[in-house]
Image (tube, coloured by chain):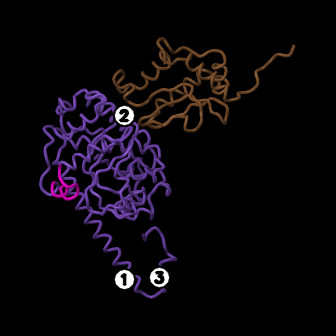
Chain colours: A brown, B purple
Amino acid sequence: MQPRGGDMPTLGLLQQIEKDFGSFTNFKEKFTEAALTFFGSGWVWLVLKREAKCLAIIKTSNSINPLVWNDIPITSLDMWEHAYYLDYRNDKAKYVNTFMNHLVSWNAAAVRMVRAQAFVNLGEPKIPVA
Amino acid sequence: MVANAVTGIAAPLKCALFPCQGFQGSTRRLQWRKNERQCARKAGHGVITAKFDLKPPPYQLDALEPHMSHETFEYHWGKHHRAYVDNLNKQIAGTELDGMTLEDIVFVTYNKGDLLPPFNNAAQVWNHDFFWESMKPGGGGKPSGELLDLINRDFGSFEEFVEEFKRAATTQFGSGWAWLVYKANRLDVGNAVNPRPSDEDKKLLVVKSPNAVNPLVWDYFPLLTVDVWEHAYYIDYQNRRPDYLSIFMDKLVSWEAVSSRLKSAKAEATEREIEEQRKRKEEEEYGTANSEAVEMYLENDDSEAD
């Protein structure tokens, strides 16, 4: 997260999201849905899957994180109740929307994405032929 | 526990969802209900609209102040518990589960640990009903009579029981519940892995469970519970779960409720034992008959027999 976060990713990260989710809007919907259908304590993640070489949204319980599956976390949202109860009480939807629109740091996500590409080959860039 | 009226069943019943021979211990209870349903199926033409209601706690929402605030109840009962009830009703409407009792829905949807979607809502409805009834204004103190005797017998002393209960509640990582239960089952519980198989039967135990799981699925008799989902204590105690638990034990527990549940549990356990003895006797008697008789039973072996 970051102060005045939210908005949209740009450049390579945006392209990858569009490739793997169709559009940024679709990604946002899916991420929100994952958070709102969460039961119990845990986390929602945007990860870069090492084997499948694509971005995915995953949910984990309690303290589990994607490192245990050797995947690379790009961003995450804490869905333990202690993360939002003081500010939002039971209004998960408000918490999640606030995170997506005002808190998520796409800068941090972009940095992680760039670093991740040192380990995961996402394919050749398209170089125009003269 | 919430009761609901069954008037008739329209939807066809799927065999796969119902506990069959695997439920040795609790078959008695469920088979009876299964027969009831079969009768209803032959008789009924109407569509059920059995619904669960949000049952209020047996006291005003501010009655447990300052230990558990009115605000906590507004959210915990008024929003969380209400949402579980509403969502459960939506999930079961028009399905085989519609018309079943809450406990049966919990059993069936636990599905040996491979949870079916309505389980979380059903179990949480049951858990919260049970939790409100585990507390009372001016609660706390010590139990008495047979309950205290059993606590002393099975934990050493009341203080040791309190320590163990608080320890279980504190160490439940993530969301969940801590329970005092009466264990009166055999090793094989059918639907789930018995978490304390080596412990003798007919004794009190402390167990903990994650998320919505409750001891009904282990065929234990719940006697007391405390909710350790963060929403239960965050408004009043923030992250201070141990403080919440101390106040719960000192000021909120309704030992009358626990005693009364113990009485029912023992009665049911005894009933079950008598039933099992009767069955075993029957089997013995048939066993002494000649072999042709046995073969006849095998050929006609429907759902009638165990």
Does residue B54 sit above or below B305 in this rendering?
above
Disc 3 secondary structure class: helix
- Please check the rendered image and state whether residue B152 is part of the magenta-colored stretch, yes or no: yes
- The answer to which of B195 and B184 lies nearer the viewer is B195
Kindly identify which numbered label has been placed on residue B294. Answer: 3
Where in the figure is residue B222, as x and y percent of width and height?
28, 51
Badge 3 or badge 1: first in the primary sequence: 1
Q: Which residue is mark 1?
A: B285
- Please check the rendered image and state whether residue A92 is part of the magenta-colored stretch, yes or no: no
Disc 1 secondary structure class: helix
Q: Are marks 2 and 1 on the same chain?
A: yes
Kindly identify which numbered label has been placed on residue B83. Answer: 2
Does residue B175 sit above or below B71 in this rendering?
below
Q: Start and end of the magenta stretch?
A: B148-158
Measure how far apart labels 2 and 1 are at the Cα level: 52 Å
The answer to whether B113 appears left or right of B126 in the picture is right
Where in the figure is residue A58, as x and y percent of width and height?
54, 33
- Look at the magenta stretch and give its main secondary structure: helix
Mark 1 is surrounded, within 10 Å at the Cα level, by few (under 14), some (14 to 19) or many (20 or more) other residues, namely few
Q: Are marks 3 and 1 on the same chain?
A: yes
Q: Residue at x 15, y 37 (%)?
A: B137
Badge 2 or badge 3: first in the primary sequence: 2
Q: Residue at x 33, y 34 (%)?
A: B82
- For the residues bearing labels 2 and 3, Cβ distance under 8 angstroms: no
Disc 2 secondary structure class: helix
